[in-house]
Amino acid sequence: MRRKLAAGNWKMNGMLADLDQLDRISAACPAPAVDLLICLPATLIHPAAHRTAPYRLMIGAQDCHMAPAGAHTGDLAARQLADAGARAVILGHSERRADHQEDSTTVNAKAQAAMAAGLIAVICLGETLAERDAGTTLDVIGAQLDASVPDAASGASVVIAYEPVWAIGTGRIATTDQIAEVHAFLRARLIDRFGTATGGAIRLLYGGSVKPDNAAQIFAVADVDGALVGGASLTADDFCPIVAALEGSATS
Ligand code: PGA
């Protein structure tokens, strides 16, 4: 049985003064059937991990370097993020694939580094609008999945987030039929590659404009094990109803 996961991605948002939202999320979202993760800018990881130590809420990062240490000015190694208190790291987010030309081979190497450091690798995949309009969504997603996910992946060490690029930050959400099609495809492909036990244990999140008012319908889709939430993870007021919807889907 896969545990549901509500993951937040603060992106390049948040100051020390905003960490009180994490207290509010912890207090207002008991959700015992759901794992909680907020991926923060690197500057906030250590203070946030310290602050949330009494809570179940996990703190994560948004990228790591593929090397364990070395001459890489401005980068952070997975083991440094773990040392600061991170438990997970988002890898291959479409904003990094676009802004930093990260390809799936790079994402795979970063995921291996994350796993070696004991971090959960939250590996993101998604098609652009042009790819969806061209009818190549499953080809694109399949190729990203194959190349981005390390052979050593397990249900404990890897989470996949399907995030259509055209749905991120746009308020435009994929239909439940579109989400169901891609998640069923991802599940079948994982089982083909890793076998039923591992392929069936890796969690599949949906991401892209998940909000309090659409979360329940997304979580009702088969093989959706949670969400990766951007804008609506910045405040407890928006994030907690999403967590509550996920808790409802886990316990119904
Ligand atoms: P959004 O971002 O919820 O603001 O669309 C999701 C993401 O990029 O992970």
Image (tube, grey):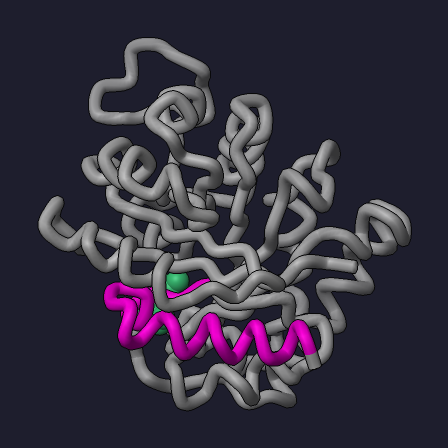
Tell me: 213 left or right of 145. left
Q: Nearer the viewer, residue 29 or 144?
A: 29
Question: Residue at horizontal 72%, vertical 46%?
Answer: 155
Q: Is residue 167 in view from this perspective?
A: no
Question: Residue at horizontal 80%, vertical 52%?
Answer: 199
Using the rendered view, name the quadrant where residue 148 is placed: top right
Tell me: 154 left or right of 56. right
Question: If the picture is divided into quarters, which one holds ligand 1?
Answer: bottom left
Using the rendered view, name the quadrant where residue 171 is placed: bottom left
Instruction: From the top left corner, tell me how far across and down residue 161 is, in percent.
Output: 54, 60
Q: Nearer the viewer, residue 161 or 100?
A: 161
Question: Residue at horizontal 72%, vertical 78%?
Answer: 222
Among all residues in the image, which is located at the extreme right?
196
Q: Is residue 86 above or below residue 159?
A: above
Using the rendered view, name the quadrant where residue 76 is placed: top left
Q: Which residues are magenta?
A: 228-251
